[in-house]
Image (cartoon, grey):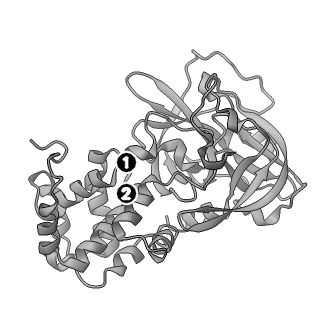
Amino acid sequence: MFFEAVPRAVYAVARVTAEQTSILGTAFLVGKNIVATAAHVTGGDDRGLVLLLNEIGSFGDYQSTNVDREIQYSAARIVAIDSVRDICILQLDGDIVPSYKVTSADVVVPGQIAITYGFPHTDTGRIVLTQQNVQIGAKVLIEAGGTSGKHLVLNTLARPGQSGSPVFDPETEGVVAMIIGAYVPAGGGGIIVGGVNPAAIHQTTHAVSTEYIEQMLKSL
Amino acid sequence: MSSLNQLISGDENAWIDALPPYQANHLHALIKKGYSPEQAASAWLTIQGPANTLPFGGDSKQPFRSLFYDMLAREVEGFICGAEKYGVDRAKLLSELKPTHAYVIAAISAAVSPVVGAAAPLIAPAVALILFTTARLGVNAWCAARKEIKNTDVPLIGQK
């Protein structure tokens, strides 16, 4: 499933304005014409929000790195958002359905290898759908808004643009989590070096369990 | 045909329970922790996901924190308390025979959403919490209380 279907299941999220197009993160199919991404990727605002359509037919094809190329897109509309869990559900036009199931972080265990697909380095304008094979380092509960939520710790250094990336369990071929950010205690201070927060340069990436996405889909 | 006084009355918790469970559960958790409805609404609009997690995406020019509860509350006040610019939306809502709580929340959220620059699904929980307070006080008393708020020197967006 993964290799052929990925370009039709994982998209870069962007915002188009009169001045510029900003690449914001990653989104992935979770239902018919429905994708999920991190809430902070959209900022809770769907004005000018689009999904960039991948140019490659197969994930094995060569991808362009020309940042000035023209890319087709589909408008996206926010239909559900959970700012506590950092999840946003978007609807788009078309007729696309996922070829995998949305499951839960419950089905994987630490030490296991998982697969993520996303668009690292979008802050530089690079739009390259990229696979990373990552080891699950831990399963953790993280507090937010008075409740705690299930998350995976991925032993990988994620980069800007990877928020919203799906985490697949290769054994069940289901999506078990979604990348939302790096572990940084208390915000990590305000020092930015070369566009990078030094506190985020480590291999502890947080991914929220997709069971919360499933709960949101039931409300649509 | 209903009046806003009739629509926004009764059990205030019904406004939270009218939200999808994934949102209602968070609001109940915040109120259980001792947040006032206003504090819970503000928290919902400003929470940026789980603690100790730095995001890898988004537009730094449009962060969640740009959404201010006060701005939203002013616009909802405008809708409920009779601002002219929401006249058409208000009339449409009141023309419904028996709108549900969910319908009222959705109608108000949709009306103020373009004004505050946020998607309706994001602001709906905050709107529900404002209606929670309005139902508790009654529409007339709530509108009067809002008028008493001293910090009203900023006009409604788009209103002179």
Of the 4 image quadrants, the one containing the N terminus of chain B is bottom left
Residue depicted at x 54% and y 28%: A72
The residues bearing labels 1 and 2 have C-alpha atoms spaced at a distance of 9 Å
On the image, numbered disc 1 is attached to which residue? B67
Q: Above or below — where is B10 with respect to A140? A: below
Indicate which disc residue B28 carries.
Answer: none
Q: Position of residue A166 (x, y in %)?
A: 70, 48
On the image, numbered disc 2 is attached to which residue? B123
Q: Above or below — where is B67 with respect to A83? A: above
Say which of A31 and A193 sits in front.
A193
Residue B21 in view = yes
**Residue type at mark 2?**
Ile
**Label 2 crowding class (10 Å Cα cut-off): few <14, some 14-19, many 20+?**
many
The chain carrying label 1 is B
Residue B120 vs residue A215: left or right?
left
Q: Position of residue A92 (x, y in %)?
A: 50, 46
Residue B141 vs residue B30: left or right?
left
Residue B121 vs residue B79: left or right?
right
Q: Position of residue A213 (x, y in %)?
A: 61, 60
Residue depicted at x 35% and y 80%: B14
**Label 1 crowding class (10 Å Cα cut-off): few <14, some 14-19, many 20+?**
some
